Amino acid sequence: MSTGSLLAVDLVIAVLAASAWLGGGAASVARRRPLALGLAAVALVATLARAITITALARAGWWFAAEKVLIAVPLSLAAVAVAGPRLLRARGDVRAVALALLFAGYATGSALLVTVLHGYPASAGAGLFAVAGVVAATVISGRALGARPSRPVSRAAVAVAVAALVTGTGLTVAPEATPAVPHDHGFPAAARISAEPTRRFTLTAGTTTVNADGRDVAAWAFNAQVPGPELTATVGDILEVTLRNRDIGRGVTLHWHGYDVPNDQDGVPGVTQAAVRPGQEFVYRFRADQAGTYWYHTHSASDVGVRMGLYGVLVVRPGPVGGLDVTVPVHTLTGRPLPAPTVQRVEAGVPVRLRLINTDSTTHRYALAGTAFLVAAIDGVDLRGPTPLVDTAVLIPAGGRYDLVFDAPATPVSLFVDGRAVYSTGPVSTTTGAWPVLDPLGYGAAAAVPWPRFDRTFTLVLDRGLDLRGLLPRYAHTVNGAADPDIPPQVVRRGDVVLFTIVNRSQVVHPWHLHGHHVLVLARDGEPAAGSPLWLDSFDVRPGEVWKVAFRADNPGMWANHCHNLAHADAGMTLHLMYS
Ligand SMILES: [Cu+2]
């Protein structure tokens, strides 16, 4: 079983255990003996079954099991130790075991809350909070049932509650002091390149209406079109892009997704520049020194902004190219897929490059039917020694790009996205749903990792948790138990080789995206990457997965480092990489 499934199974068992204990307690209060004993038996089995799931999770990595081992196991043992013997002795009135069963329910339930609301890392504060909750709920229940706690028990309860209050701040305070991340001041000085631009573009952001899947829908667009204009350049060009904001009230910027531009051109509001307000403009200028498939999008109110249409394609070619070269950005506008580009027919034998871009916030499955093909590049970087693929699907993470190349066959070719044909040169009678999915970590020819050692290592544990820092508590997407802006930045020096371990202990996929750098994938779940070197800027960390990626810190500045499910980024899952 995968670690992701194990996390889900353990959660289900924990919910079952806690609710069965509580249900058994309630049934015994109501003197419904068979029901009470039946539920208690279920609870006992479920509680003991967690010994298996928690052990397996701990073996998959301490990140997955820390709070379960340190908090749930002791509380579960207490539940079994208190309720078990009383159940075995329950001869007469079943009401006699009610308080024991309720105690077991509070104990397993509060441990469950620690997992769901707090997660990783486990802290003494979280443990004491859980214990204090159990004590308080048991004392209140006991009084309601007419049982008076003894004096030592009451004293112990008060002591635990006080300790919980004192240390409980550990629940709300980030583990380390947070160096300030600049917000709307102290932006990097524009180290503007002086060379004369060779490619000039103007993008004007504004509200508009576009046709999506046959219906007119409201959109936010660059130059009144979704996607925005396709920006193309040749390596060596100096791009100058003037961004104007006509009427986007939440502000606009341009972030060059996957393009490792100088920091002051990166387009992150509050970090590298101020958001461009209605009536304002900002001029971006950078040298096109990386060939490949990229895209641009607003980073101001990015969740709603990109979803509403403020994005476009950036393609940089190494020089003149022959054959057919098409970009296929896939985007969903208010729940409707946008039309793919118009199909151009070519003679058989003509080389074709399909540049697939996922501009949505969730993974898409692409299947190219009717021809063998190569995955020539991922995230703009050419793969080493790609081999032909037939009847194989690829999964592209949010923000990711795959370049598929093939020679046009004489027969039709069809590209399916999530089972829907989006780009077809003719009818292809194939169902692609059962095709195997390419694992890029095993595709192409391997090469040695270019660094013998790492100067800095960081671990990011992705989860959900209660964020109590703002005015209103929110159920945030967290990194190491904290949510933006309270996640400590990762501080590196120029020239460092940096290793990231990224762990997903949540129930959802997190497409990870570091600005300003491509990272080299080293391993996933302990298995070293065995194919072509993979230099990615967007990669899906699925539930239960552990990724190891590394990069050389060679692009100084303050860089966003976040989940590219932009709703998650907005709900806390954003931190920063900072050069000292
Ligand atoms: Cu995410």
Image (tube, rainbow, N blue to C red):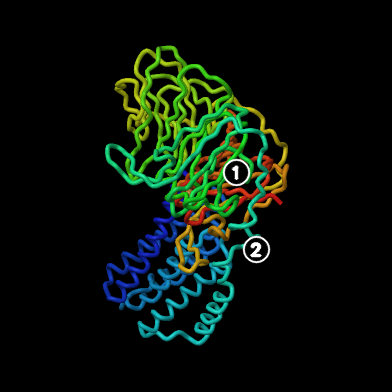
Compared to 304, does 293 lie above or below?
above
Can I make out residue 52 in this image? no
Marks 1 & 2, CB-CB < 8 Å contact: no
- 3 over 520 or under it: above or below: below
Q: Earlier in the sequence, mark 1 or mark 2?
A: 2
Q: Is residue 452 left or right of residue 476?
A: right
Residue 397 lies, in percent from the top left, at 47, 39
**Within 8 Å of ligand 1, the CB of disc 2?**
no
Q: 40 or 135, which lies in front?
A: 135
User: Which label is found at residue 177?
Assistant: 2
Q: Residue at x 48, y 86 (%)?
A: 150
Task: Judge by depth and name the residue closer to the eye, 539 or 438.
Answer: 539
- The count of marks equals 2
- Work out whether residue 444 or residue 495 is closer to the camera in this orientation and state it: 495
Residue 513, position as x, y percentages in the image: 54, 44
Res 265 label: 1
Give x and y (percent) for residue 193. Answer: 66, 38
Distance (Cα) linking label 1 and label 2: 29 Å
Q: Position of residue 11 (x, y in %)?
A: 42, 56
Quadrant where the N terminus sits is top left
Going by the numbered disc 2, the residue's amino acid type is: Ala
Type of amino acid at the residue the image marks with label 1: Gln
Above/below status of 36 relative to 486: below
Q: Residues within 10 Å of mark 1 (few under 14, many from 20)?
A: many
